[in-house]
Amino acid sequence: MIRFEAVTFEYQTAEGPIPAVSDVDLAVGRGEFVAVVGANGSGKSTFARLCDGLLVPTRGRVVVDDLDTRDADAVWEVRARVGFVMQNPDNQIVGASVEDDAAFGPENLGLPRAEIAGRVAGALSATGLTGLERSEPHLLSEGQKQRLAIAGTLAMHPDYVVFDEATSMLDAAGREDVLAIVERLARASGTGVVLVTHRVAEAVRADRVVGLAAGRVIFDGEPAALLGDENAVSRLSLDVPASSAIAAELRTRGIDIPPGVATPEALVEALWL
């Protein structure tokens, strides 16, 4: 479990400390899919970096299973357990080929060659990159690059994976590819997933949504509850998907539409039933 205990993080500036995350208490378990939403400057990316020790709290503590991220002796074990996928895959890809890049992490763990090969094959299969092993990463599409960044993370066999706005640079097809991988991770492999996103349509696919405003948690609950909370949606500066807005209008006209409808497919299904 990734556990935040009264966590505050402040960036130090010439004008003094600026709080980015303030007094956060929450936990993410293995197999749980949690989306973190909020406006720009709400503390989402700081929260993500606190999960794996890229940042350590100014006050409070973050514990990954039994490891405190403030413990310098535990930091590498923390990062082995918590994978991190960045917004821009070019900042994460280091290998000369797809296969080399996916193998980078396991090689640094000092694993046997046969185990590395097996992990790489599994990670590339899970991300739809089988057959591109010898390709040069810079020749891949943006969507393929992001899937390669995910493959490199999966090859480490982490217990948790944090996606920090990992779909923001992708087109609709690329976003769907990444989200499908995210859902399989949480629901099929039992990996704990934290998805930082500004897209409500992505967040509603999670089991749970955490909303940050000015570094504080102002919402923590199921996606359907968030969509039904106009005050929280407004404070989080979220754009409600068109499908949700249509569903809300239909409810005012007496049509029975269940809460949490956020995609065209869900709306059609609700109307058809």
Image (spheres, rainbow, N blue to C red):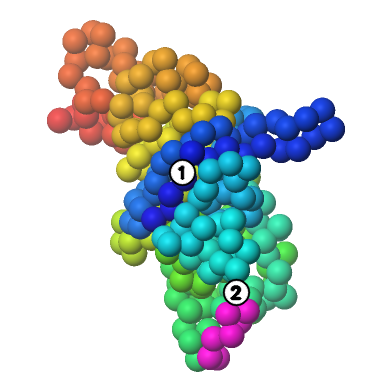
In this rendering, the answer to whether 231 lies above or below 240 is above
Task: Count neighbours of disc 1 (C-alpha within 10 A) and say few if under 14, some if 14 to 19, many if 20 or more.
Answer: some
Contact check, label 1 and label 2, Cβ < 8 Å:
no
Residue 211 x %, y %: 46, 31
- Name the image quarter holding the C terminus: top left
Residue 263 x %, y %: 36, 33
* Residue at x-position 48% and y-position 79%: 119
- Regarding mark 2 in the picture, which secondary structure is present there? helix
Residue 125 x %, y %: 45, 72
Q: Quadrant of residue 222?
A: top left
Q: CA distance from mark 1 to mark 2?
A: 29 Å
Span colored in magenta: 107-113
Q: Nearer the viewer, residue 4 or 44?
A: 4
The residue beneath circle 1 is 5
Residue 45 is marked as: none
In-image side of 225 versus 193 (left or right): left
Residue 258 seen in the current view:
yes
Foreground mark, 1 or 2? 1
- Name the image quarter holding the N terminus: bottom left
- Regarding mark 1 in the picture, which secondary structure is present there? strand
In this rendering, the answer to whether 172 lies above or below 268 is below
User: What amino acid type should be assigned to the residue bearing mark 2?
Assistant: Gly
Mark positioned earlier in the residue sequence (1 or 2): 1
Q: Quadrant of residue 26?
A: top left
Instruction: Tell whether position 161 is magenta.
Output: no
In this rendering, the answer to whether 266 lies above or below 166 is above
Residue 163 seen in the current view:
no
The residue beneath circle 2 is 105
In-image side of 29 versus 257 (left or right): right
Residue 81 x %, y %: 48, 65
